[in-house]
Image: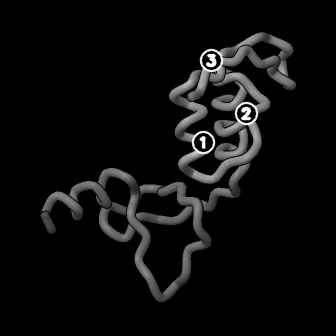
Amino acid sequence: MYEDKTLICKECGAEFVFTAGEQEFYASKGFENEPQRCKACRDARKKALRTDRETYTAVCASCGKDAVVRFKPREDRPVYCSECFAKMREEQA
């Protein structure tokens, strides 16, 4: 039913293949438009969007180190650094 299509990336101009399997997946999700960017450009775009998020610095409630978080810390809730948060999750499991 579906056949591989060669498309042109609107970002870098490179050709990329929109496979029959990808087309079937898009149809199953109800997507009507074909992808406009190659995988490398899609990945770069996602990464850029992720790094543009605002970050905040807080003091870890467990070890006292600085912790960088992507949410605005509130004074009524503790904030933990990545290491302490991972340890807490392991203990709860």
Instruction: Give residue 19's position: percent from left, percent from top.
Output: 58, 22
- Residue 56 is tagged as none
The residue that appears at 51% across and 28% down in the rendered structure is 21
Residue at the extreme bottom of the image, as rendered: 76
Separation (CA) of disc 1 from disc 3: 13 Å
- Compare marks 1 and 2 and give the one earlier in the sequence: 1
Nearer-the-camera pick, 53 or 78 = 53
The residue that appears at 54% across and 59% down in the rendered structure is 69
* Type of colouring: one colour
Residue 93: which quarter of the image? bottom left
Nearer-the-camera pick, 3 or 89 = 3
The amino acid sitting under disc 3 is Asp
Residue at the extreme top of the image, as rendered: 15
Q: Which residue does the numbered mark 2 point to in the structure image?
A: 35
Q: Which residue does the numbered mark 1 point to in the structure image?
A: 26
Vertical arrangement, residue 2 with respect to residue 28, above or below: above
- Compare marks 1 and 3 and give the one earlier in the sequence: 3
On the rendered image, what quadrant is the N terminus found in? top right
Residue 2: which quarter of the image? top right
In the image, 5: left or right of 73?
right
Vertical arrangement, residue 23 with respect to residue 20, above or below: below
The amino acid sitting under disc 2 is Pro
For label 2, the SS is loop
Q: Which residue does the numbered mark 3 point to in the structure image?
A: 4
Dot 1 and dot 2 residues touching (CB under 8 Å) = yes
Separation (CA) of disc 1 from disc 2: 9 Å
- Compare marks 3 and 2 and give the one earlier in the sequence: 3
In the image, 44: left or right of 1?
right
Residue 11: which quarter of the image? top right
The amino acid sitting under disc 1 is Tyr
